[in-house]
Image: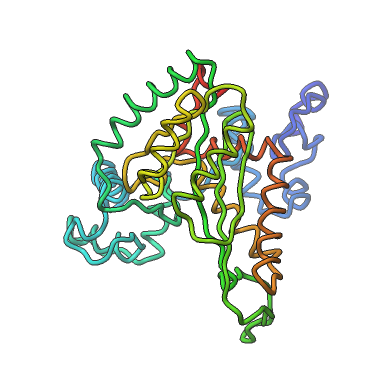
Amino acid sequence: MRGLGRRMRRRLCGCWRCPRWWGGRDRVEVAALFKVSARAVDNWWAKWRAGGRDALLSRPRGRRVGQHQVLSENEQAAVRQAVLDHIPSDLGLSGQLWTRGQVGELIFKLYRVRFTEPGVGKCLKRWGLTFQRPDKRAVEQDAEAVRLWHEETWPAIRARAKAENGEVLFADQVGVRSDQVTGRTWGAKGATPLVRRTGNRFCVNAMSAISTRGRMHFMVFTESFDAKVMCRFLARIVGHFGHKVHLIVDRHSAHRSKTVRTWLADHKDEIELHFLPSYSPELNPDELVNADLKRSLTHTHRARNQAELAAETRRFFHRRQRQPHIVRGYFGVQHVRYVLDENTLSF
């Protein structure tokens, strides 16, 4: 090894196992320097002579990912697709939510192979699946009506609004209760934290409308939502615009009442109502405003009476009106992103 020569020793390659780093030391000195056996030094020397520096680089230990697995790649792909496309009850199991235990039962049912729950968890992670809170859809929803909304109704509304230089708004109503769930907070293990709030029960209602331009319009009221309240809200919307408004709402009975239809007939050049498919709140971006409101009030809610709760609700909407970037962000959620495309970013 001393025969490496000065020129060879000076060419430092960065690998501490490489003989170029040994500086002319013999095998015993090198072994003592790196606290290994002389045989290990001999192995390094042989590898370096056979393959140079690359032969000395560390390699991952153990089996390769996917090597010697109990299930074949096709079987794993079939289980993954079954989890994505079905709920457990569809496949003869119990329940509607997939757990590691349920996936393990599915694997045993299909291939007679038993997995532990940690083993199933590793498979799910390797397949790119994560444990998530599921979104909800009503069983009464008409899939064909939703398809028509995406492919025909909404594009037609968008085209009309663009041709008329009008404004498209999505609207919805929401109720806020004084006994709403507070949320979560930190506390000592085994000792449930206490939150003081009024024992009186009262509520306020609100109606809001948003556009992809970041505009928000709202009305907070204490009476029940009915056709008269809807007409008041429509009048307020019309008063904010000098051009026609296309307002998209759900099929609440107040929206389709005779009183509202009569009011709309008298203002047909100013505003027009369009209805989402039944049982399809996920198509309305304004539902995200409602969720944001309730989430926000759980952190700030200190109201002792209806007037204070109404004031807190108004403060939320005024704050969002000054934050158009957040209003535009509601339209970025996956199930309402259909509203946006390269031709409709201004709507």
Name the spot of residue 208 as percent of width and height, x first. Answer: 57, 45
Residue at image coords 53%, 21%: 166
Q: Using the image, determine if residue 125 lies above or below residue 246.
A: below
Q: 199 or 40: nearer the eye?
A: 199
Horizontal relation, residue 66 to residue 288: left or right: left
Q: How far across and down, in percent of the image, does residue 262 sit?
A: 40, 37
Question: Residue 162, image x and y in percent?
Answer: 49, 16
Nearer-the-camera pick, 285 or 109: 285
Q: Where is 169 relative to 30, above or below?
A: above
Q: Nearer the viewer, residue 62 or 71?
A: 71
Residue at x 39% of width, y 22% of height: 155
Q: How many marks?
A: 0
Q: Which residue corresponds to the image point at 66% horizontal and 81% vertical from the top-left?
A: 193
Residue furthest to the bottom in view is 191
Q: Residue furthest top?
A: 163
Instruction: Point out residue 12 in the picture as x, y percentages from the top left corner.
Output: 78, 28
The quadrant of the rendering that contains the C terminus is: top right
Tell me what residue is drawn at x 74 percent, y 28 percent: 13
Picture layout, residue 257 above or below residue 168:
below
Q: Quadrant of residue 128?
A: top left
Q: Nearer the viewer, residue 46 or 201?
A: 201
Which quadrant of the structure image shows residue 235? top right
Say left or right for 71 vs 122. left
Q: Is residue 149 above or below residue 231?
A: above
